[in-house]
Image: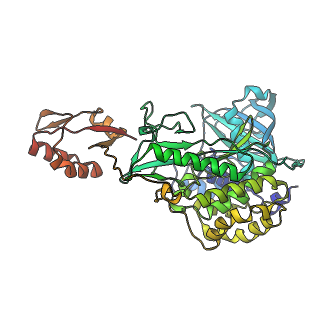
């Protein structure tokens, strides 16, 4: 047996397994509170019972007095698979088929309820389903096991159960060939006088400095984030220099003092910024664990917790996030680390050090439930307790003296508990020359799509019914009433705009889409 599994027992505790999956933002069977939930639900007991403990509970009294340990929602599952996962790959895939079904609604289909498993070709299974199964097993700390995935009637998939393997799978991690290539794509956002300014105002989608594919609104053509795409390099120092040139280039394209470049986890609500690092070596379980433990945890200790914990709930934030590529893989877990050049250099140096020595670095505590909870909740006090061992293990590697100077700034921030400041214009930290010119974006109100649909508003004009008459708000506006209009936008109070309309005879104003 895996000693981690014996010590922590995540897979032996079904309720804890579901809590762990939920914490890691993995779609799975949802736990419910019997005191507040809607019925019917599924009642279960602790331990492994081959599904015989599963009961449909119809009332609150039944839930409380019949001795069930925890409860989950009932799902209408269209199809269920069982995937055998070893490390970061799927070994076999089986589909669950019926013999003499007792309850079709039961979310975990076992022999006890008339179901059996049949082998199928893994090529016929959606790639997304296999990726979810791999990460689901990964976050439990198990190296191998069986993940059951249910496909719902709407096409969505959820993890319904995870079980450990009877035989232990052992990985033999290989020492990477040095040097290996490194690359990155790292994002930042534009702020004009404190408000979000679309990246597409100045940048095209393609190119070394372009726009991330996320649009402010679907098919709007307005892109929210700037993405820096440096040329790959054979060292962290060379990659840093490539990034520095592109930040200078980006600044030259936006020569305005009142526009700020903002990085970090989430410079504006709803828009997460990533700092993806590319590695020109094969991905392995050992390497991914080492990056999570020895790179993501130290970086978490200097991130702004308020926004970092929001990003970690997204599909790019969180432990064990990666994309395999023809050149190797892309590590997605980190937020945008270009806030300060010294942080950038330290982060890249640490990434190269960890990747070089991942086969020597142990990650015993990464999958402890308390560690994961602290990571996702931004609890630096708990994570700081891990720092002494993390630093000691890094210093034991033979390459540490080579990176010591680059790492010193990050280590000092961690030990002095200095957080990143996401509100700063990163150009000032990078000592980029900034023009004194002021950018004028005009008088614009950004109206959320939901509100536009509610009141039938269109871009460029707004029709309001005031005292049973329609007025057309067109292109021009009296500057005198700009501040009053801003109050209306912030409070979304229709009575204010009605009042203004009566006072000024429905003046004109330019509207713009917003998310």
Task: Report if residue 241 is visible in the image.
Answer: yes
Q: Nearer the viewer, residue 189 or 331?
A: 189
Can you tell which quarter of the image residue 476 is in? top left
Residue at 30%, 33% in the rendered image:
459
269 relative to 209 in the view: left or right:
left
Q: Position of residue 327 (x, y in %)?
A: 75, 37
Q: Position of residue 477 (x, y in %)?
A: 18, 41
Q: Position of residue 367 (x, y in %)?
A: 73, 58
Which quadrant, please, contains the C terminus?
A: top left
Above or below 457: residue 188: below
Above or below 287: residue 117: above
283 relative to 240 in the view: left or right:
right
Task: Report if residue 11 is visible in the image.
Answer: no
Q: Nearer the viewer, residue 222 or 80?
A: 222
Residue at 64%, 66% in the rendered image:
409
Can you tell which quarter of the image residue 281 is in? top right
Q: Position of residue 419 (x, y in %)?
A: 55, 66
Q: Nearer the viewer, residue 372 or 420?
A: 420
Can you tell which quarter of the image residue 420 is in? bottom right
Number of marks present in the image shown: 0
Residue at 47%, 54% in the rendered image:
433
């Amino acid at each position: 047996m895996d000693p981690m599994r014996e010590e922590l027992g995540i897979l032996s505790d079904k309720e804890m397994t579901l809590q762990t999956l939920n914490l890691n933002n993995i779609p799975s069977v949802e736990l419910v509170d019997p005191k507040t939930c809607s019925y019917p639900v599924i009642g279960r007991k602790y331990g492994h019972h081959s599904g015989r403990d599963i009961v449909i509970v119809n009332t609150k009294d039944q839930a409380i007095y019949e001795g069930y340990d925890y409860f989950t929602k009932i799902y209408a599952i269209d199809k269920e698979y069982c995937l055998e996962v070893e490390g970061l790959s799927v070994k076999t895939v089986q589909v669950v088929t019926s013999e003499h079904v007792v309850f079709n609604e039961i979310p975990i289909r076992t022999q006890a309820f008339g179901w059996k498993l049949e082998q199928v070709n893994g090529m016929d299974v959606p790639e997304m389903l296999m990726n979810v199964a791999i990460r689901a097993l990964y976050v439990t700390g198990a190296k191998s096991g069986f993940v059951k995935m249910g496909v719902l009637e709407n096409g969505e998939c959820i993890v319904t159960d995870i079980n450990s393997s009877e035989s232990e799978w052992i990985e033999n991690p290989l020492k990477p060939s040095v040097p290996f290539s490194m690359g990155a794509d790292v994002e930042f956002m534009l702020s004009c006088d404190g408000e979000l300014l679309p990246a597409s105002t100045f940048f095209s989608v393609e190119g070394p400095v372009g726009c991330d594919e996320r649009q402010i609104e679907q098919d709007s053509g307005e892109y929210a984030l700037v993405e820096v795409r440096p040329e790959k390099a054979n060292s962290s120092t060379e990659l840093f220099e490539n990034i520095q040139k592109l930040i200078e280039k980006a600044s030259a394209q936006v020569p305005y003092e009142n526009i700020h470049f903002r990085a970090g986890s989430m410079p504006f609500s709803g828009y997460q910024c990533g700092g993806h690092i590319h590695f020109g070596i094969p991905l392995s379980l050992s390497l991914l664990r080492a990056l999570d433990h020895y790179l993501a945890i130290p970086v978490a200790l200097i991130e702004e917790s308020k926004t970092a914990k929001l990003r970690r709930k997204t599909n790019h934030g969180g432990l064990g996030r990666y994309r395999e590529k023809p050149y190797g893989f892309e590590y997605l877990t980190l937020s945008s680390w270009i806030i300060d050049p010294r942080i950038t250099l330290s982060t890249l140096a640490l990434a190269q050090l960890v990747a070089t020595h991942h086969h020597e670095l142990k990650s015993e505590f990464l999958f402890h439930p308390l560690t994961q909870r602290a990571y996702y909740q931004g609890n630096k006090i708990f994570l700081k307790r891990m720092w002494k061992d993390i630093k000691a293990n890094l210093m034991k590697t033979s390459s540490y003296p080579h990176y010591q100077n680059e790492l010193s700034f990050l280590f000092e921030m961690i030990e002095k508990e200095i957080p990143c400041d996401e509100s700063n214009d990163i150009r000032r930290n990078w000592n980029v020359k900034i023009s004194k010119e002021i950018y004028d974006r005009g008088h614009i109100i950004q109206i959320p799509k939901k509100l536009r649909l509610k009141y039938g508003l269109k871009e460029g004009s707004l029709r309001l019914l005031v005292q049973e008459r329609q007025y057309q708000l067109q292109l021009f506006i009296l500057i005198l009433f700009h501040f009053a209009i801003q109050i209306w936008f912030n409070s979304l109070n229709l009575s204010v705009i009605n009042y203004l309309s009566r006072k000024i005879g429905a003046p004109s104003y330019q509207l713009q889409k917003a998310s």
